[in-house]
Image: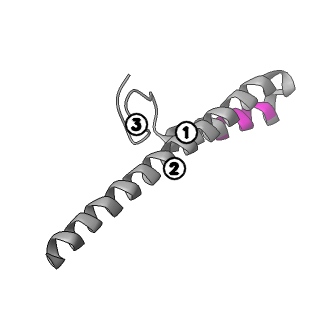
Amino acid sequence: MMADSLGHGHPYPLPVIEQEHELVARIVVRYGVVYLPLLDRMGREVVQAKRQVEGSARAQAVLDGYAKRGRDEAASS
């Protein structure tokens, strides 16, 4: 596994998961609902990947806030 925008160890970045989700949807439409469990699984993968991206962004915002506060406190001393 490679590290990527989703965080350490996640095998695929969000855009790739979304592309595969679209591909599976096309397969379901063309070949039938027998492939619907794959579509459901890919839907869950998209949700999980988005949560990881959003979580990483929230964590970075917290770090940025503390860094800014530290700079502001140093400047006012």
Above or below for 62 versus 70:
above
| Residue 30 coordinates in the image, percent (x, y) | 80, 33
| Residue 56 coordinates in the image, percent (x, y) | 43, 46
Is label 1 in a helix, a strand or a loop? helix
Which range of residues does the magenta coloring cover?
22-28
Quadrant of the image containing the N terminus: top left
What residue is drawn where x is 23% and y is 73%? 72
Is 26 placed left or right of 55 in the picture? right
Most extreme residue toward the bottom is 76
Instruction: Say which amino acid is labelled 1.
Output: Ala
- Within 10 angstroms of label 2, few (less than 14), some, or many (20 or more) residues? few
> Toward the viewer: 51 or 5?
51
Q: Any mark on residue 49, and which? A: 1
> Toward the viewer: 61 or 35?
61
Is label 3 in a helix, a strand or a loop? loop
**Which residue, given by chain and number where applicable, does mark 2 sit on?**
54
Instruction: Say which amino acid is labelled 2.
Output: Glu
First reached walking from the N terminus: tag 1 or tag 3: 3
Circle 2/circle 3 CB separation < 8 Å: no
What residue is drawn where x is 35% and y is 27%? 2
**Residue 26 colored in magenta in the image:** yes
What residue is drawn where x is 51% and y is 44%? 15
Instruction: Say which amino acid is labelled 3.
Output: Gly
Above or below for 69 versus 60:
below
- Within 10 angstroms of label 1, few (less than 14), some, or many (20 or more) residues? many
Q: Any mark on residue 7, and which? A: 3
| Residue 71 coordinates in the image, percent (x, y) | 20, 68
Most extreme residue toward the front is 77
First reached walking from the N terminus: tag 2 or tag 1: 1
